[in-house]
Structures are given as structure tokens and as C-alpha cells.
Image (cartoon, rainbow, N blue to C red):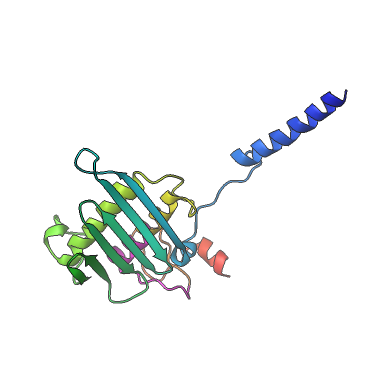
């Protein structure tokens, strides 16, 4: 009889723990907010087999501290981009073996057939987007709406960079954040969920 009581209690505790783990108790995860993305401080690093039949590893890193997003990609050589999404003018700092260069936005890259051939800014922006998509968004683990996962960290940085470089949105950590999930929305609009978080 004691064994049956013990077994029943153990079964109930196990079922409760399992329900919490898989989210049966009605808790649905929420997408991170634009404000949480802007304010986020995190680092993610991915290493995978690279060129020369996998003999060389390639590495992709995002190191974000508030407004500053540092993206590093190592294939044969290391290339690093530093983007401060809270700073004007819209620009990219490019760090390589030869030093640091700055590419400032002087024209829109969106309507050009081959943006990589028009300006240094558009060329760098195109390269950043390709690296984030090919190395991060495709291979990062986790849920893209969870800022605690590598995929969520990559997606947050990707959205901020797109809004900053394509739409000219300059963010601030001291005001409401424009909705980074909206397509081609003006710089002044803030999402309703962000207003809830800030208020």
C-alpha cells in the first residue's frame, strides 16, 4: 500500500514537471519586444567546418552591447563590422587586417539591381546581410523569437541592422523603440507591445 501511494505521488510530480517543460499548462512564449532587442546585451558564437574540405573552421560571432552590434566572420581571414544603430550618420565601421575603414550611407541600396557594385556602403551592407543569413539565421539553434537563443540573438541583430541601414531608423535606448518587425515603417512609430513594456 505504501508503495502504491509513493508511486502515485511520484507519478503526479513527474507529470507536473513534464507539463511545465513542454508548456502544456497554458503558457505560450512571447516574442521579444523591439525595446528588449535594442537594449539587449549578449554574445553568440558559431563554429562550423569551412573551406578546404572542412580542414579550416569558419567562425561567426555577434557581440551586442546595447546599440553597438559587432559582427565578426572568419573564413580565410577575419573581417569585422561594427554598427552603432543609435548613431548618426548611418555608417558601418569595417575592421580587417589592413585597419579600420568607415562606409557612410550616401544613397539608398534598396532599389539597385546590384548594390554590391554601387558604393562601399551598399557593398558592405550586402555582405553583412549575406553573412548573417548564411551563417546565422540558417544554422543558429533555437527559436527566432526567443532572445535567449542563438537564433533569437541573430534575428534581433538582423532586424536592427535592416531598419537602421535600409530605412534610416536611428534608435535610442532612452525612448520608445520603433517596431522592428514592421516592414518599411517610418522612424517615429513604436509598437504597442513596446509601449506596454516602457510604460
Residue 156 horizontal side relative to residue 165, left or right: right
Reply above or below: 151 against 100. above
Name the foreground residue: 153 vs 60: 60
Quadrant holding the N terminus: top right
Name the spot of residue 79 as percent of width and height, x first: 24, 60
Name the foreground residue: 69 vs 80: 80
What's drawn in magenta, residue-wise?
A: 159-175
Report if residue 188 lies within the magenta region: no
Report if residue 168 lies within the magenta region: yes
Q: Residue at point 69% right, 33% down? A: 15
Q: Residue at point 41% right, 55% down? A: 44
Q: Residue at point 38% right, 53% down? A: 45
Residue 165 horizontal side relative to residue 145, left or right: left
Image quadrant in which you'd find residue 16: top right
Image quadrant in which you'd find residue 97: bottom left
Residue reaching furthest front? 55
Residue reaching furthest right? 1
Residue 104 visible, this angle: no
Reply above or below: 24 against 170. above
Residue reaching furthest left? 117
Q: Residue at point 19% right, 72% down? A: 106
Residue 160 visible, this angle: yes
Name the spot of residue 6 as percent of width and height, x first: 81, 29
Name the foreground residue: 53 vs 68: 53
User: How many labels sit on residues?
Assistant: 0
Name the spot of residue 104 as percent of width and height, x first: 21, 72
Quadrant holding the C terminus: bottom right
Name the spot of residue 142 as percent of width and height, x first: 45, 45
Amino acid at each position: 500500500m505504501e508503495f502504491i501511494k509513493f508511486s502515485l505521488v511520484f507519478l503526479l510530480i513527474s507529470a507536473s514537471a513534464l507539463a511545465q517543460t513542454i508548456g502544456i499548462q497554458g503558457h505560450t512564449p512571447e516574442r521579444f519586444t523591439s525595446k528588449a532587442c535594442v537594449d539587449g546585451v549578449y554574445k553568440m558564437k558559431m563554429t562550423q567546418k569551412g573551406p578546404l574540405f572542412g580542414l579550416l573552421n569558419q567562425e561567426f560571432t555577434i557581440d551586442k552591447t546595447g546599440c553597438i552590434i559587432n559582427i565578426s566572420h572568419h573564413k580565410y581571414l577575419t573581417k569585422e563590422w561594427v554598427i552603432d544603430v543609435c548613431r548618426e550618420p548611418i555608417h558601418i565601421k569595417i575592421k580587417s587586417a589592413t585597419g579600420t575603414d568607415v562606409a557612410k550611407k550616401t544613397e539608398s541600396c534598396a532599389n539597385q539591381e546590384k548594390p554590391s557594385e554601387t558604393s562601399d556602403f551598399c557593398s558592405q551592407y550586402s555582405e553583412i546581410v549575406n553573412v548573417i543569413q548564411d551563417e546565422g539565421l540558417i544554422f543558429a539553434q533555437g527559436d527566432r523569437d526567443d532572445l535567449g537563443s542563438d537564433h533569437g540573438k541573430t534575428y534581433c541583430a538582423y532586424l536592427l541592422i535592416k531598419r537602421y541601414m535600409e530605412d534610416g531608423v536611428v534608435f535610442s535606448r532612452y525612448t520608445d523603440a520603433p517596431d522592428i518587425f514592421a516592414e518599411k515603417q517610418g522612424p517615429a512609430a513604436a509598437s504597442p507591445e513596446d509601449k506596454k513594456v516602457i510604460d
